[in-house]
Each structure stands twice: as structure tokens, then as C-alpha cells.
Amino acid sequence: MPEESIDEIIEEILRESEEKESAEEEELVVTEEVYECPVCHHTVPPDAKFCPYCYAVFEDDVNYRDLTDTLIKKLKMLAKYASERNIPLPALKKSVGEAKRRALAKDFQGSFEVLQEAYVNIMNTIIPELKKEIENYTAVIGVDSSLREIYGRAENLLEEWDINGVITHLNELKSRAEKLSKELRLFLEELDRAERAVTIAKNFSINPEKAVEAIDRAKDLADKKQYREARDALKEAFTPLREDIDATVEKLLKIAHEELMRRVTRGGKETKRVLRLVKELKIYRDEGNWLGVLEKMDAISKELSKH
């Protein structure tokens, strides 16, 4: 028997390999076989008796009473959600009434079919509204990347018609967004105070260069969305100026004391206001709150300049 040539052996190996790959591809097609629900167009398992998303029935041997109970619970949840968001569902009451009438007549399949149709119609009404709610946070995820995952999960759950899951993630988005907005607002308020304090320092001939450097660092932290750290940096911005500020405070307190001595015989609201400001300034100085000290220095100076 003649020996096979090398070319013939290679051809045989290639042929066997191609046949094996073809068989594997056929097996893959079989294992990945799926169906699309004709009602909601979700992908469903090939052996599903009903759609797990919209509850459209594919086979007759299902327990309509159990499915009806499930739909009633979902419809109650959707009605509550719609009511909280002022989404009108005018046909729901009529559908529930018709479903009850059929159930009393022992037509459980007919009762289920009425509720299933109502459920699909309501979902088609509510899903666009939920989509709008989710999209309201598009700007927020651009500010805080940690919210993108929550946003993405909410979108995916909406595709799956998991309304409870969507609402849970929306509530988390809302809570996190409000907290973010609050942190940003607090930072901007502190930044405004710090920048005004720089002007006050200059008015008292205090060099604010080191404070300005700290404020710039705080701005860099804020650009990275680290608002709490940025606020902490602002609170410490004037600490390097404490000796210069303290020396200026002593001069101002001496001037205030002399002015108050001149006013003491007159008394009045102006004197009491200066005394209150001096007391607050000393408290801030004891606490090491130099930004607060500068603000009180400015307020005292303005009071003394009135007379």
C-alpha cells in the first residue's frame, strides 16, 4: 500500500479541522437559540411559557390565577409611582373593574388578559417618564464619575422593565446628586469668604501671598471634585499669616478701646455693637480661625469709622 504523501496528510488534517469547527458552530447556534417576545420584544428563553417582562402567555398550560396575582402587585406599585409623579393612568381603573368582573365569572384567563394588556400600556407610558428622570442626571455624572455606574445600572434596569430597581437607583442618584450640590455650594461659599478675606488683609497692610497660594490649592482640589478637602484647605489658608494678623489685631483692639472709652459716657447701640464684635473677634482668635478674625477686624473697622 503506497505511503501517503505529506501534502495528502496535511489536507486530511485540515479537512478534519474544518469539519470539527463546522460541528462546533452548529452546536453553538443550538445552545444560543433564543426567542423574542412579540409583545414587548424582549429576548426570552425558548422554553418560556410566558414572557418574564410583560407576562404575555405563549402556552395554554399556565396558572392564570398566579399570574394575575403577580400583575395586581405590579399594577399597585406602578399606580403608586405614577401618583407620586402626577402621571395620569385614566384607563387603569376601568381595566381593573373589567378584570374583577371576569374573575367573578370564573373567567380567570380573561381577567388576566385584561390586566396584562393594561400592564403593557402602563409600562409604555411610564418607561419614557422614567427615562427622562434618568437623563436629568446626565450633567451630574459628568461632574462625578462615581455616579456613572449607578446611572448605567438604572438604564439597564429600565431596559429590563425592573421598575422597582430603577426607582431604587434613581433615589440613590438623587441623594448623591443633592449631596454633591450641597458640598459644591458650601465650597463656593467658603471660597467667597476667603477671597474677601484676602482683600481685608490687604486693607490692613497684611501680605496675603501665602493665603492666596492656599486658596489656589483649594481650587485645584475642587476641580477634582474633592470639595470637602478644598474647604479644609480654605479654613487653613490664613494660618501662615497668624503672626501678622495677631499683631494687627492688637493694634486694632487698642484703637477700639480708646474709641469705646470716648463713647462710654454716651452708651447706645453703636457701643454695644463694637463690644460684641470685639468679643467675637477674641473667640475666633482663641480658636485659631484667622479667616473669621479678619472678617471681625473688617466689621470693627467699619463700625469705628462711622464716628
Image (cartoon, rainbow, N blue to C red):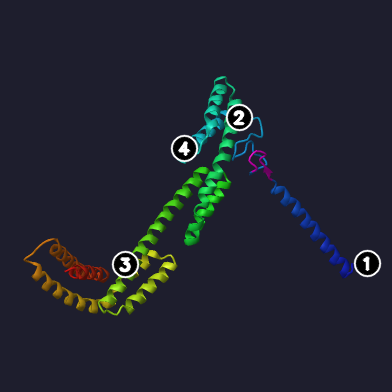
Q: Is residue 267 visible?
A: yes
Residue 44 seen by the camera: no
Asked if marks 1 and 3 touch (Cβ < 8 Å), the reply is no
- Using the numbered discs, state the Cα–Cα distance from disc 3 to disc 4 in whole angstroms: 44 Å
Reply above or below: 28 against 63. below
Taking the image as shown, residue 306 lies to the left or right of residue 67, namely left
Residue under numbered circle 4: 83
Q: Earlier in the sequence, mark 1 or mark 3?
A: 1
The stretch of residues the image draws in magenta is 34-41
Judged from the image, the secondary structure of the residue bearing numbered disc 2 is helix
- The answer to which of 141 and 299 lies nearer the viewer is 299
x and y, in percent, of residue 175 in the image: 42, 52
In front of the other: label 2 or label 1?
2
The first of marks 2 and 1 along the sequence is 1
- On residue 113, which mark appears? 2
Q: At 24% from the left edge and 70% from the top edge, which residue is drawn? A: 298
- Name which of mark 2 and mark 4 comes first in the sequence: 4
Q: How far is mark 3 from mark 2, CA to CA?
A: 65 Å
Q: Amino acid at mark 2?
A: Glu
Residue located beneath label 3 in the image: 193
- Residue 129 is covered by the magenta coloring: no
Q: Nearer the viewer, mark 4 or mark 1?
A: 4
Q: Which residue is mark 1?
A: 2
- Amino acid type at circle 4 is Ser
Residue contact between numbered discs 3 and 2, judged by CB atoms under 8 Å: no
Question: Looking at the image, is mark 2 or mark 4 nearer the viewer?
Answer: 4
- Camera-side residue of 235 and 306: 306
Which quarter of the figure is the N terminus placed in? bottom right
Q: Residue 139 appears at what percent x and percent y?
A: 50, 58
